[in-house]
Image (cartoon, rainbow, N blue to C red):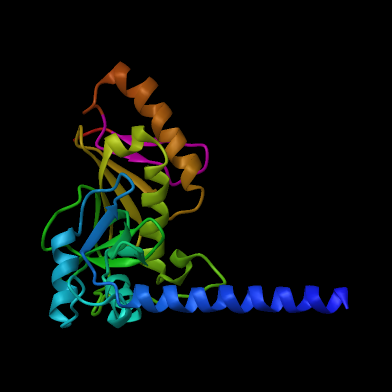
Amino acid sequence: MKRLITLVFWLIMVATVTTLFIFANKKQEKQVCKEFKIEINYEGAPELVSKTTLRQEITQNKLKIKGNETGKLEIEKIHSILNSNPFVKKATLTVGVNGIVKAAVVQRKPLVRVADLQGRQFYIDEEGFLMPLSHEFSARTVIANGNIRPVNKISNVVSKDKPQYQNLRPDLKSIYLIAMALKKDPFYEALIEQLYLDENQEFQLYPKIGHQSIIIGDTTGIAEKLRNLKIFYTEGMKQRGWDAYHTINLKFRNQIVCSKPN
């Protein structure tokens, strides 16, 4: 008998809590949205998208948030619109009990700006995603140009079983790998402003200071090549001056072959 009373008690408790939960849920659904907040985390990257632009994209899709009942908000659609922006890495939506809807947005980090043979320009971000140029802002990154095959459409192939940059075609993948290697050391970031892909499909770097062409060939041993370059600039160039050499060739392992201006 005692066990039966205990069981009935807990059944009543569960039913009561469930009823209260349903009531609170329905009450919250009737709550009118007082404010729609957008917070963008740029994670130290240059700004490429603004809150105003994201609001406009939602408005253009005829979605009303502020002043609408939270239960009538098309949360999945709003979420999809935010995440479809090419500069957005991730967006999450929360609806507070106080009627405030908040979108937390993380922007992608532009790594390198690419210009193909037809002059079309786009960014590759730090994960390997392609992004168009921003109509609002410009990011100061290393520039890659030269004999880069045209990119007719900026689109991304996404696969979950490998890093995103592995989905890039070979020339763009090489550009990504070199740009990432430069990104890892402030010295390279401060020194190099341009990657150039020549007619032999070999890469050259051009510094911000001096007039050297730094030949690196392909991405094989790129970390070692850049280490040698750093040693050469910090120990060798200060002895002879920035314009002592016309080319610095790093293609060959454990060698730096230089040529002087004519």
**Residue 182: horizontal and vertical position, in percent?**
37, 43
**Residue 93: horizontal and vertical position, in percent?**
35, 67
- Above or below 143: residue 69: below
Could you tell me if residue 107 is visible in this image? no
Residue at horizontal 31 percent and vertical 67 percent from the top = 130
Mainly helix, strand or loop, the magenta region? loop
Residue 162 placement, left or right of 33? right
Instruction: Depth check: give the residue in front, 222 or 152.
Output: 152
Name the outermost residue toward the top. Answer: 239
Quarter assignment of residue 148: bottom left
Quarter assignment of residue 87: bottom left
Instruction: Depth check: give the residue in front, 110 or 151.
Output: 110
* Quadrant the N terminus occupies: bottom right
Q: Which residues are magenta?
A: 245-259
Residue 94 placement, left or right of 73? right
Could you tell me if residue 179 is visible in this image? yes
In the rendered image, residue 251 lying in the magenta stretch gets the answer yes
Quarter assignment of residue 210: top left
Residue 110 placement, left or right of 177? left
- Above or below 73: residue 39: above
Instruction: Depth check: give the residue in front, 152 or 101.
Output: 101
Instruction: Depth check: give the residue in front, 112 or 38.
Output: 38
**Residue 211: horizontal and vertical position, in percent?**
19, 37
In this rendering, the count of numbered labels is 0
In the rendered image, residue 122 lying in the magenta stretch gets the answer no
Residue at horizontal 30 percent and vertical 77 percent from the top = 30
Residue at horizontal 26 percent and vertical 32 percent from the top = 245
* Quadrant the C terminus occupies: top left
Residue at horizontal 25 percent and vertical 79 percent from the top = 153
- Above or below 56: residue 134: above
